[in-house]
Amino acid sequence: MAVDIEGIVAHYQAKINERLGLFFDEEIKAASKISDYTQEVVANIKEYTLRGGKRLRPIFLIYGYKCLTEANIDAVIEASISVELMQSYLLIHDDIMDEDELRRGKPTFHIVYEHICNTLFGGGATRKFGENIAILAGDLLEAYGIEVLTNSRFKEEYVTRALRKYAEIVKNVGYGQILDIMSEKKNAITEAEILQIHKLKTASYTIENPLQIGAILAGAVEADLEVMSNYGIPLGLAFQIQDDILGLFGTEEKIGKPVGSDIQEGKKTLLILHALSNCSEKEKGYIISALGNADVTMAEIDRIREIVRETGSLDYSKRLVAEKIEEAIHAIEGSNFRVEAKDFLVKIADFVGVREF
């Protein structure tokens, strides 16, 4: 039977968004008892979280659970928003570190509060104010994610294990971000180092660990979690490499942030690394001068795109995406998981490789 991947994703996105809305409404009410300021911050956190997003992490959590059982599905949908709240927390902090001004086509959280500072208090250190409030908003979101998982309607033993996995995600993303920031300053970086950053920052927290949290809530054993690692890590790497391709060759309308922002931030993606290894000295100088240049022009980005194509770097990255997807599919097809969940995970793996957003 054919799997309607877009239909299934849309179905769960709607349920997850509804649950997020209810959760935030409760938190806004609680924050209103403290101050109008705290109420407004939580209301803006709600807007930021609900303005868009694919909801892939909670969907993977739901399907990690469905790999083992279909029982008590409403409870797992409630629990799944924990990883979306974590995602919002990490994005808000990431936007500050990257000095991004757009997220999902709208101002980033610290920019929202820079404008609010101007309106409420006038000029003077408005950027710092915006960043301070955004850091606190991220901290609140992390606490919200923990709260949701702690209050989830599962055996206490399962919830404790799930919380341990949640903490593991936050640690791994933190380690990956440290390496990522360091890599922007280093003169040289290897493909192995880039893939390690992708594994820590993307693969573990986008696919592998959300699947595992869902499975843990269903009473998974270690062998189940191992299959999910063998599926989630290569698929997560494919997801991030595809993200890097879209970051350079996509459109702002589809990706929700300026095209070439990775170049502005000085990110050494696989595309850039491979191009630098295979281009002329003149072209190498051109790329290096653009990396980390906040004022890089669209014409310069177009030229970098040309170099990336001409050196075979784009084809190399696309091949790697295809290989990793194949590896992920092979891992899940050989498992003893429920057929419906397996079929979904195979189909969504293909979806990752062709997505344009």
Image (cartoon, rainbow, N blue to C red):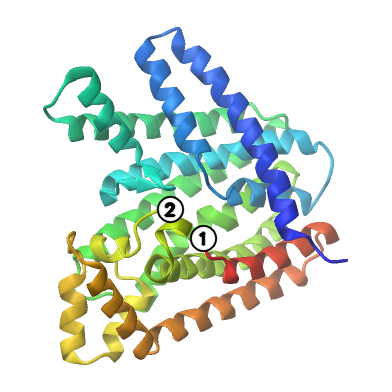
- Residue 226 visible, this orientation: yes
Pick the quarter of the image with the N terminus: bottom right
Q: Name which residue type carries label 1.
A: Phe
* Viewer-nearest residue: 131 or 79: 131
Q: Which mark is residue 256?
A: 2
Q: Residue at x 39, y 65 (%)?
A: 247
- Residue 215 visible, this orientation: no
- For label 2, the SS is loop
Sequence order check, earlier mark of 1 and 2: 2
- For label 1, the SS is loop
- Quarter holding residue 89: top left
The number of numbered badges drawn on the structure is 2
Q: Which residue is drawn at 34% across and 29% down?
A: 136
How far is disc 1 from disc 2 in space, using C-alphas? Answer: 8 Å
Q: Mark 1 points at which residue?
A: 357
Q: Cβ–Cβ below 8 Å for labels 1 and 2?
A: yes
Q: Residue at x 77, y 50 (%)?
A: 66
The x and y percentages for residue 248 are: 37, 69
* Crowd tier of the residue under label 2, counting other residues whose Cα lies within 10 Å: few below 14, some 14–19, many 20 or above: some
- Quarter holding residue 206: bottom right
* Viewer-nearest residue: 220 or 16: 16
Position of residue 263 relative to residue 70, above or below, is below
Q: Is residue 11 left or right of residue 145?
A: right
Position of residue 105 relative to residue 284, above or below, is above
